Image (spheres, rainbow, N blue to C red):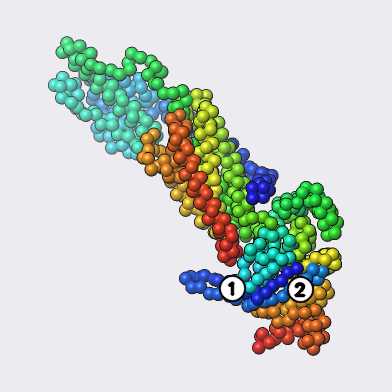
Amino acid sequence: MIEILDLKKVFENKKKGTVSYKEALKGISFMCKPGEIFGLLGPNGAGKTTTLRCISTLIKPTSGTITVNGFDSLKDDRKVRSVIGFLTSDMKLDGFFTPDYMMDYFGRLNKMSPEDIAERKEVLIKELHMEEFRNKKIDKLSTGMKQKTSIAISLIHNPDVIIFDEPTNGLDVVTAKNVTDFLKKYAREGKTVLISTHIMGVAEQICDKIGILIEGLIKELGSLDEIVKRNKTNNLEDVFFKYLEVQDV
Amino acid sequence: MFSDAYIIMKKELKRLFTDRRTVFFMVVLPLVMLPVMYTVMGKISQSRSADIRSYHGTVFIAPEMQKQSPIYEEFISIINSQMNVTINEIPEAYIPTAKELIKEKEAQLLITFPENIDFAFDAIQPFDIHVFYNGASDYSSYFYRRTYDAVNSLADTLIYLRLESLNIPTEILTPVTANRTISPELVNLAKKGSEVGKVFGVLLPFIIILYLFVSSMQVGIDTVSGEKERGTLAILLVNQVDRASIILGKLLAVVCASFASAISSVVGLMIAGRYFLKDLFRSSAEMSDFILGADQILQLAILLIPVAILLVSLVLICATYARNSKEAAGLVMPLYMVVLILSIGTSSMGETVPTWMHYTPIINTVVGLKSVFIKSSSWGNVIIAAVTSLIFSGLLIFFMIRMFKNEKILFRI
C-alpha cells in the first residue's frame, strides 16, 4: 500500500550566482492499494517521475508524507526500499554483465539466500521469456530484452510494491503486451502496482485507478469510468486533452 | 554494511579484471613497458657511448711551426695515446677555415698553441693552449673533454720535468693521497643492497604514488562518474543497500585495482633494474643485492595500503561531485599535478627531512618508502605516515558518504 499526502517537491537551480526554484510537485495526495494497478498519467514534465523517485527514496520530498506498507519514506528509507521494486527509464544496466549475473548480484544485495535467488530467478526468467538471453552480455541485447532484464532485476526480491516509470516506453507491441500482462498478474496476486505513463491505451487497458497529473497537481483521480463520467467525455484521451487545452489557454 | 560493500567490491573487480583491455592497460602494460623501455634506453645509451669512444675524429693543431718543440711532441703523444684522431697541423691563416669546419661538424677540434712554448717553459712562465670545439656535437664535446685531460697530463709531466731539472724529489707534489693503497671495494661500507636502494629510493616512491593515482583515476572515475553518466548507479540506489556500503565497495575495488597496477609497475621496474643501474646510472651495484627483509616488506604494506585508500578517496570524491567522467577528469587533474610535484620533490630530497614532513599525508609516505628502500626506516615514522593517511582518508570517505546522500550532488544535471 502506498499513501501519499500533500507531497511537494521544489528543485533548486543555481546558475551563474543566481538561484531559481522549480516547483515540480505542488501538493499531491493519492493512495494505491494492494491488488490494484494505479496509473499516474501526465505529459512530459508533469511530475510523474519526480513522484515515483520520491516514493522510491531516490530523492527526498520538500514536504508532505509518503508511506509505503506502513514505512515512512524519510524515517525508514531502507525498509521502504526493501518492499518496493522500482524501475525507471533513467536506470540502465551495466552492459558488461549477463542478466543471470545481475539477478544474482541484486538478489545478494537484497539479502536473499542463494537458494531463494536461484528459485526466484527461474520464475522470472520463465515469466518474462528470458531463457534465450539469460547468459548473453546485456550490451548485446535488444531494447525489449534489456527492459525485461531490468524488470527481472527490480523484482528479484519479490517485492510487495511495484513502481514502474513508463514500463512500456520504446518497446515493441509483443514485449509491451508481455510486460502489461506481467503487471496484471502481479496485481492479481495482491501486490500494489504503481505505474506512470503518457500512453492513454496503457492506462485504459491495465489501470484500476488513474491519477491525471498536470504541472505538479493531480487534476483527476479515480477509476477510468469515474473520470470519464465526471468529465462527460467518451474516453480518457478527451479528459486528458481537456486539461492540456485549459493549460495552454 | 561490510557484507554489502564486499558484494559490490566483488562485482566491480569482476568487471575490471575480466575486461581484457583494462587488465592489459593496468597490469600487463606497466609490467612489460618498463623493462622494455629501460632495456631500449640502456642499449641506446650504451651503444651511443661506444660509438662516441670509437669515433675517428679530425683535430687541427696550429700553428704548424711547433713541430720541433719537445713539449709539443709530448702533447701529441698524449693525444694519440688517449684519442682516436687524425691530427692535421695547419698554418695560422687556416684557423678560420678550421673553425668553420668544426661549426659544420666536419672536424671536431682546433688546438692553438702560443708562440715559443719551450722558451716560456724554460723561463717558468705559464702559457695557455686554446681548445675550440662544437658544444652541439657529441663527438666534438667528447674530444674536448679528453683534450682537457691531456692538457692536465701535460701540465703534470712539465712539473715533474721542472722538479727533476732542479733536483727536487717529485714526491714533494703529493704529500698526501687518498685510498691509493687500498682496494676500492674495501672502503665502501654501505649495507648490502643499500646502494641499489638509494637509486630505487629516488625512483620507486614517486613511481608507486604515480601509478596508484593514475590507475585510481582510470578506474575510479568510471566506477562513480561513469556510472552516474550511464545511469547504472540509480538501480543500485533503489535497492536495500546503504549508500556508505556502495562507497566502501567501490573504494575497495578501486584500491585493489590501483594496487595491482602499482605492484605490476614495481615488478616491471625491478626487472628493468639491471639495465638502468648499469647502463643509465653507471652503478656497480647489483640488483641481486637488493633484497628486502620481512620487516621492510611489512613496512611497505603499512605505508602503501593507507596511501592507496587516500589517493582513491581523493579521486572518488571528485568523481562523486562531477556530473560526468569528463568533468571528473577535469577536477582530478589539478590534484594529480599536486600529488606528482609533492612526490617528485620529496623523492629528490636528502635522507633527513624536516619533522613536519612526517605528519603531512602523501609526503610522509614518500619519505617512508624512501627510507624503507635505503634500509634506514623507523617504525615510528612508518606508523605516523599510515595513521595520518588513514585519518585523512576517513575524513574524505565521511564527506563522500554525505555527498552520496545529497540528491543535489548525486543527481546534478
Q: Name the side, left or right, on which B73 lies relative to A41.
A: left
From the viewer's perspective, is residue B155 above or below residue B387? Answer: above
* Chain under disc 2: A
Residue underneath mark 2: A39
Please state, as top left, top right, bottom left or bottom right, where the C terminus of chain B lies in the image.
Answer: bottom right
- Residue A170 placed where, x, y %? 76, 67
> Disc 2 to disc 1, how far (Cα)?
23 Å
| Residue A89 visible in the picture | no
From the viewer's perspective, is residue A188 above or below residue B252? Answer: below
User: What label sits on residue B59 in the rendered view?
Assistant: none
From the viewer's perspective, is residue A115 above or below residue B405? Answer: above
- Front residue of B193/B138: it is B193
The count of marks equals 2
Residue underneath mark 1: A10
Q: Amino acid at mark 1?
A: Val
Q: Residues within 10 Å of mark 2 (few under 14, many from 20)?
A: many
Q: Name the side, left or right, on which B132 lies relative to B11.
A: left
From the viewer's perspective, is residue B209 above or below residue B123? Answer: below
- Residue A61 placed where, x, y %? 62, 70
